[in-house]
Amino acid sequence: MPTEARKGEALAHESATAHVSGSACYIDDIPEIGGTLHAAVGYSEHAHADLTQVDLSAVAASTGVYCTLTAADLMHGNDIGPVLPGDPLLADTVVEYAGQAIFAVAGESRQQARRACRQAKISYAPKPAILSIKQALAQQSYLIPADSLHRIQRGDVADALSTAAHRCQGEMFIGGQEHFYLEGQVAYAIAQENNGMLIYSSTQHPSEIQILAAKILGVPQHAVTVRVRRMGGAFGGKETQAAQTAILAAVLAQKSQRPVKLRLSRKDDFCMTGKRHPFLVSYDVGFNADGRIQGADIRLAADCGMSADLSLAIVDRAMFHADNCYHYPAVSIVGIPCKTHTASNTAFRGFGGPQGMLLAERIMQDIANTLNCDGLAVRQQNLYNDSNRNATPYGQTIEDKTIEDIVTQLAASADYQQRQQDILTFNQRNRVLKKGLALTPVKFGISFTTTFLNQAGALLNVYTDGTVLINHGGTEMGQGLFTKVQQVVATEFGIATAAVRGCATDTDKVPNTSPTAASSGADMNCMAAAMAAITIKHRLATYLAERHQCNLAQVHFADNQIFIGDNAVMTFGELVRAAYLQRISLSATGYYRTPKIDYDKANGCGRPFYYYSYGAAASEVMIDTLTGEHRLLRVDILHDVANSLNPAIDCGQIEGGYTQGLGWLTSEELHWNEAGQLTVTGPATYKIPAVSDVPADFRLALYTVANREETIYRSKAVGEPPLMLALSAWAALENAATAAAGKAVTLPPPATPECVLNAIRGV
């Protein structure tokens, strides 16, 4: 077998050809077993109401309907809350958001099931609904008691504010974001013998679905197998919220004893599932004449929707990132998880980090406006950079000067100072078109803030022809995790990457998996796979050393050969076959737990993150002052990947993350009517970035200094941090709007054309 590039090489995604040819198998592509039923869901039209009647007689009598399902049919439980209770699979006596599932139908075809849903007779007794963060704050509608709110405190904030030479205060609403994955929520459930259930699910967290499905079905966990080969995108929207689709399909399959597929339409997906959390943030900041912060009092209130879901951890991460890259000598941060009558908001790429970091950049913009100075100068004044300015608000030490180096290098390579002068000249000469430029940094903590999730397992099998099959707990959603794991295993054995194959994530092979989230997928699963490979390699090397009467340290694996010293003695395949004949196990499990992390929430201090991933971006924009429309002219990015496992995949993640962040900050706008019903339900009314929104001049470079921590090959995570690079585009738009208005203006995200135009006109 030919030798191929392995770790650190820019290999193509393992499914790239299958993706573009259409041969990649997603759940809706799985050949259906004879007798498969198709399900649909009926959901609430009201944001908050008592259910006074749920009459499904006409539904059951509809053509093609095989069975129906309501909360009354659930004999073993109805709550699928992933962390705290409060997420009913189906509403029972009350509905708490418009879009909440009330019943499900299984029919001979998807069209028949959906048509039957419209025949339901449901009566409601409406109740007062809380539909905004301000309403929730006024009524203290929180997920937890007010005296249990998470607080981070350092120093005497009141004194720092009162003695500061300058002070700025403000409030900003940060909008949510729809995940808009290409493959919607979908599951295919097949009843097995002995009360077993096989569930194909488009999920980031197979084990959670296994646990919840077993509970609702009334069977032990070993009776439920959850399998996922790939997802057509997820972005956090399938970390917890894939469970409802999967479990509804499973319960219907158990009830009917026929296979059941449930695939939500785009509209139903929009209405039923949660989004990125909207936040209402407020701040009071004191700073000196140079723009250096002396004290900050910060409040972050999140719209969590009707239930907890993952909101407490998301608010925590927003708090942990309210500093972004900046040192606050005295600081108070409080997080408020608000309960409203909207869909339960959930994980989204960045998991609260973007909202916290946007607040930090809002503060930097305000300081620059107050002092009438350049935004980059203010940011550089406040960067973590020396022994007296290296402690985060929660007490974790910044042990490097990476962010200072990145900002300095990018400012030089992007020619920031000269371009600012050129933009000033352009704006003076042009009345209608105005330009703006901003450079913003990123510091993102890598680890689950829920500590026990920082673990991963793998199962590795070596076959007698020298090929390898690796199964691990991570899921592939297009981000290239399987490719990186293949490269790591190939590197450990010294064989071609093509000799290693990854198979579907499956709860009957690797148990008790953590979700693929928090940018930890490669860090943890690659390490677990490497541990399994090292175990087998040690067995093989021990056998060979005994056979050749040599020291174990002399045996090494490279280029598909096994060497003793400098001499190649056999191929990897030959060694495997010889070991098999000697009854040496060629299968092993691997396990990894992230070290060094510990956080005391009661005292608001500790080390919640193993390390930080850094980056910076400079974005230049131009706005039309007559319409508010904008064009992104150029982007320069320098992003920290350390010893990249695969630069091609990492570059794709950085470019894609920036673009998704651009959508959140400039075009993706969610609207609800006065009844609490979502009014944007598809691409006709919800604008995600298109290829024309990405500038032709997009300059990306990788910062490749090795990780100081012992990650897999000293690499760094790259999934979530790049999204926050788009904060530079938002800041650049605000700078351009300020130039157009002739005075400082603020742009609440998303900075849509209407928002920009209103800011310029002072509306």
Image: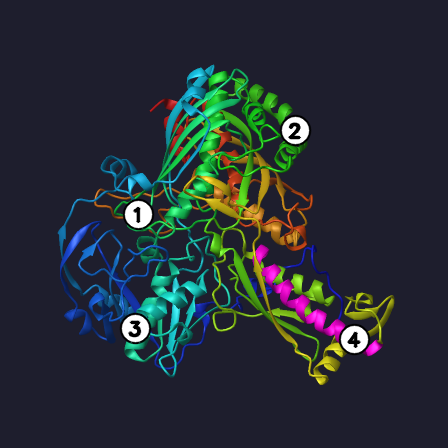
Within 10 angstroms of label 2, few (less than 14), some, or many (20 or more) residues?
Answer: few
Identify which residue is drawn at 20% across, 68% down. Answer: 72
Q: CA distance from mark 3 to mark 4?
A: 55 Å
| Residue matched to label 1 | 305
Q: Quadrant of the N terminus?
A: bottom right
| Residue matched to label 3 | 252
Vertical position of residue 611 compared to residue 731: above or below: below
C-beta proximity under 8 Å, tags 3 and 4:
no
Among numbered discs 1 and 2, the one appearing first in the sequence:
1
Q: Can you give x and y, in whole percent of width and height, for residue 282 in the image? A: 37, 30
| Residue matched to label 2 | 415
C-beta proximity under 8 Å, tags 3 and 1:
no
Disc 4 on helix, strand or loop? helix
Residue 146 is drawn in which quadrant? top left
User: Which of the two discs, 2 and 4, sits closer to the camera?
Assistant: 4
Q: CA distance from mark 3 to mark 1?
A: 27 Å
Q: Which residues are magenta?
A: 522-548
Vertical position of residue 481 compared to residue 420: above or below: below
Q: Can residue 109 be seen by looking at this rendering? A: no
Among numbered discs 3 and 1, the one appearing first in the sequence:
3
Residue, far bottom: 581
Q: CA distance from mark 2 to mark 4?
A: 58 Å
The amino acid marked with disc number 3 is Leu
- The magenta stretch spans residue 526: yes
User: Which of the two discs, 3 and 1, sits closer to the camera?
Assistant: 1
The amino acid marked with disc number 4 is Leu
